[in-house]
Amino acid sequence: MVCPYCSFKNSLSAHICNQCGIILRLGKTSRLVPPASTGSGGLAFMRGLLPGRAKSQLATLQSRIADLASDVQEKAEASLKVAEKAPAARLTLGALFLIQGEIEKSVNRFQQAQQIGSADAEFRNNAGVALARRGAMPQAVEMLEQAKRLCPSSVSPFSNLAHIFLESGSDPDPTGSPPAIMEIQRALMLEPKNPTLYNRLALIFCRERRYEEAAIQFQQAFILSTGDASAQADAQNNVGLAQFLAGDRAAAATAFVAALQCDPNHAHAQSNQSLAQAQETITPFLLEKLQRAARLDPTGGGVRANYGYGLCRIGAINDGILELKEALGLNSRQFETCYNLGKAYADQDVLEVAERYLARALHFSARSGEALTAMGVVKTQQRMLPQAITHFQAAIRLWPQVPLARINLGVAQGLAGDFSEALLHLRTAAKLSPLDAAIPAQIGWLYLRQDSLNLGVEELGESMRRDPHIAEVQNNFGLCYIAMNKPELAVPHFKRALELNPDFHAVHYQWGLALANQKLQDSALKEWELSVRYEPGNADCYVNRGVTFYQKGQIDEAIAEFRHVIVLRQTRMEDFSNLGLAYAKSGVKLKKDSRNPQDPRMKQSLDRQKQAIDMFDRALVIEPRNVMLHSNRGLACFFASQAEEAMKEWGLVSQINPAYASRRGKKMQSEFDDTQIALMPFTVADRAVPIAPKTGPYLPRFLAGYDTDEWDLLLNDPALVRLQEMHRDVRRLERDVAAL
């Protein structure tokens, strides 16, 4: 199958593209994405610059960065040629590559420097940053702790340790927060007018849900940023972040507007503003704003993640997946991005991929009710029910008042056969959400699983009164009508179930049963033809098709169906008996159709009777005293010219069950007993289905200011200091130019 996004040729059985990861059966979903806007004309003047001048300044600055970086690299490499060890040159190259974002090259140079004895504070701080950006957090912490001890007067190691704590996940951490706060407070003693430190301290407070204290620190950062529009935008954005997390949406909206007034192209503030407005629903306008934020900052993992979140929210799943994967490539430590990818794949039953992303999400936030619930859904769909139950129970401990995890737990326990516990959790969920139609639907399914038809019908009826648009409820109602011998009333429910969910392929089997019970054999066969296409392992469906063909006199077709049953299972006497009877009937017909002993059909008839005998033998292994089997085997032996064997079988029938032998009389020696060829017994409990467990909502990623993304390097080389400042300037200018 050719991927509609990257044109990679996948195998026909592939569920996702092996190159770009989109879900192939969904096809392209970009048609749901609004066209990109050209932006408002008022943003054409950034910081007093005309568009042409902004582009010119960006080009000039990029050229100066390239020249300066080249000069620094040439000097360092020249030093390496003169002195083989030259640790200072290696440190310079490590810092240069780190500033340029070439992390692997940077780590390599720092490792070389360490091998030749580098051990000062500059090396340990910068090497720690390189390791942190690589994702090697334990090693990074060790390096930074050593740098802190070597140079207690430098703010950088303290600030970087706090940064690592903020990067480590999204859960409140009672053991990690106090040390991180102490690191920032030590740094503030050294640099009390550094706004970035106040922002980082406030973000730790946000993580601990101490939002009022966070807002105070963010305000202090704003005061200290006077004269720096970008830094003030960072601080105002962070104030809005704290206010929104505290539940004050109106104040947060005002703060985000203030941030954009300071810097109209602050992509983080624009993304946050859009997310705050999109809590209930995402309009095309809000999605376009998220898209614009991503366009302003295409290398920003956070804004790209939020655009992917918006795409998934409107149903553009594949476009969202691509954007989320890009975001994760830019910043691999984003909990929300991993969770959203896991949820997107889980909702489409791409379970192995979903599990990988959700495992990463839980690594970053082990106390996320959303991630635990989604992982429970994956485990339920994989029928790993003990693990699913464990995840749902953990989610309930975090979400005691949220019904979703309880409903899912009830389904998992119902599937595991723990009906009393399942009912308990579903009843509790009903108290939490008394109007939710899904809860009585699940309770009704649970009663059907226990063969409590009347109680099941009562609950399903309540669910349908609340919401008649649930396909599983329509299906289960139809099953109940079949069980009540009212197949004509079942058909409209099956039809409605498929209208509501065209992918609800299990309906075809029971719809066929309802039609067959009304003697509408041709219509039943059409439904079962669809059923075996979507449920190729449903042996009962092949039995029913074979029985129907047999009853219609289409013996060859019946043989084909019964043979398929034997391929799928060999544990049921009736399956061998059915195939044996079909072979025997086919042999009789071939014999009647032949005109003389030389007719090839005579030999075919004999072969069919031998095949019938073999099937009866296999059936008798399972039920050795079944008189019907002995009777039919005897007649097959007679038609196969094995008269003595036939008499022996009929003698056994008379010994085992004289009443049966008397009732059959001469028919036992002239007609096969096919009275037990019948449709498979129908069990509501086996075919009733719950509403599939559901994941929680997609999660946005509210973003702190740009200053908190920066790492603090110790740089003794003035050229590197200038280069780092120029890189920060160019990132701001790139956003300005992108707004044109």
Image (cartoon, grey):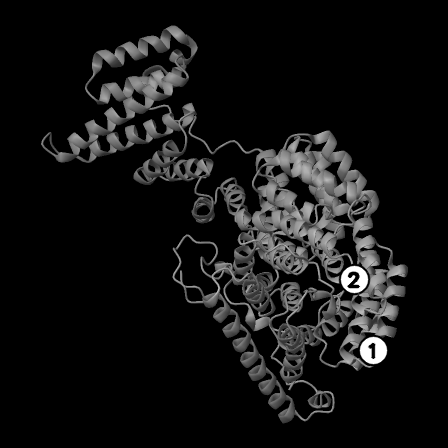
Residue that mark 1 sits on: 258
Task: Out of 517 and 252, give the one closest to the viewer.
Answer: 252
Do residues under tags 1 and 2 come within 8 Å of each other at their CB atoms? no
Task: Out of 520 and 359, give the one closest to the viewer.
Answer: 359
Residue 617, above or below 310: above
The first of marks 1 and 2 along the sequence is: 2
Q: Position of residue 564 (x, y in %)?
A: 36, 36
Residue sitting at 87 percent across and 64 percent down?
217
Q: Residues within 10 Å of mark 1 (few under 14, many from 20)?
A: some
Q: Position of residue 8 (x, y in %)?
A: 41, 63
In the rendered structure, find residue 135 and report the number of the disc placed on it: none
Q: Position of residue 635 (x, y in %)?
A: 28, 20
Q: On the picture, is 321 further left or further right than 529?
A: right
Identify the secondary structure beneath mark 2.
helix
Whether residue 150 can be seen here:
yes
Q: Amino acid at mark 1?
A: Ala
Residue at the far top in the pictured view: 655
Q: Amino acid at mark 2?
A: Arg
Q: Which quadrant, please, contains the C terminus?
A: bottom right
Residue sitting at 71 percent across and 73 percent down?
286
Q: On the picture, is 381 further left or further right than 272?
A: left
Task: Out of 445 and 4, give the one closest to the viewer.
Answer: 4
Q: Residues within 10 Å of mark 2 (few under 14, many from 20)?
A: many
Q: Position of residue 11 (x, y in %)?
A: 38, 55
> Splitting the image into 4 quarters, where does residue 528 fall?
top left
In the rendered structure, find residue 200 and report the number of the disc placed on it: 2
Residue sitting at 48 percent across and 62 percent down?
20
Between marks 1 and 2 in the image, the one whose residue lies nearer the viewer: 2
